[in-house]
Structures are given as structure tokens and as C-alpha cells.
Image: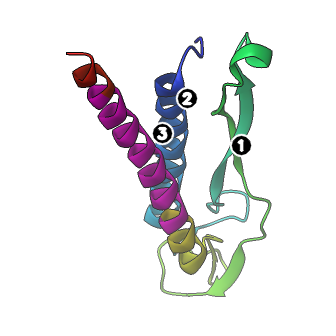
Amino acid sequence: MAINNIFDVASRSMSSQMTRLNTIATNLANAKSVASTKEEAFRPIRPVFEVDYASDFLESGLSTTDVKDIVSLDREPERIFRPNHPMADEQGFVWESTVNVDEEMVEMMETNRQYQNTLEVVSTLRTLISRTVSMGQ
């Protein structure tokens, strides 16, 4: 997808932040989930961003961000003794996800701010364009 103007930059930036918000929602939905094995335990996921430059970057100076990949964080799940849990192994242990709810809430607030900032840029730009057009009438 080409980067032709500030609206393209904002659109792709907002799309990347939406992906980030979706990964946070997935993490929160799986907080405190348990599994019967260490390998099956949920690990938090994060998007990996990359900068994408416009083909005429030297003239336009336009660049934006895209999601390159979504990766699982390398965290060890916690082994918890819950002998009455249906997923417990023969020794009575389950493996709990490694999602830190506080960390996810901070990520969510940061994502929300970045999304809102980009939206504010687009709104301001539209207002300026509208005023410029009306000045010529």
C-alpha cells in the first residue's frame, strides 16, 4: 500500500494501534487461564512494529508504521497446586498463564493515547483544509 499523504500515514498508524489493542484484549481474556501442561499455558502476545517509508521519502518525508508480526512473550508459566481442578495433572498441578493484568492495562492506556493523538492530527488537518478551501471562496 502506497503512502501518498498524511491521511495514509494516519490510517496505517491507527490500524497498527488497533492491532495492538486487539492483542491486549486477547491477553486480558486469557489472564488467569490455566492449562494442564507447561507448553499449553497461554503466554502474552505483542505486535512487532516496523517503519514503512514512502517511495518518495526523500522528497515527501512521509513514513508510517505497520505490524510486521505478532509474537508470544518468552515467559515461564507458573505451576499452581489445584488438586480439584479438572485440568490438574496427576500430582494436582495446573499451569497458569503469564499475563500481567497491570502491565496490560498500562499498554491499553498507552495504545488509547496514541490512537487518540493520531485521530486528533487527522481532525485538525481536516479543519485546516476546510478553512483553506473556504478562504478561496
Q: Residue at x 48, y 60 (%)?
A: 113
Residue 32, how many percent across, how many down?
A: 51, 75
Where does the magenta region start and end? 109-131
> Does residue 123 show up magenta in the picture?
yes
Q: From this view, report whether residue 52 is shown above or below residue 114.
A: above
- Judged by its main secondary structure, the magenta piece is helix
Quadrant in which the N terminus appears: top right
Asked whether disc 1 touches disc 2, contact meaning CB atoms under 8 Å apart, the reply is no
Residue 33 visible in image:
no
Count of numbered badges drawn on the protein: 3
SS at mark 3 in the image: helix
Q: Residue at x 45, y 59 (%)?
A: 112
- In the drawing, what numbered circle is on residue 9? 2
Which dot, 2 or 3, sits closer to the camera? 2
User: Which residue has dot 3 on it?
Assistant: 14
Dot 3 crowding, Cα within 10 Å, few <14, some 14–19, many 20+: many
Quadrant in the rendering for residue 125: top left
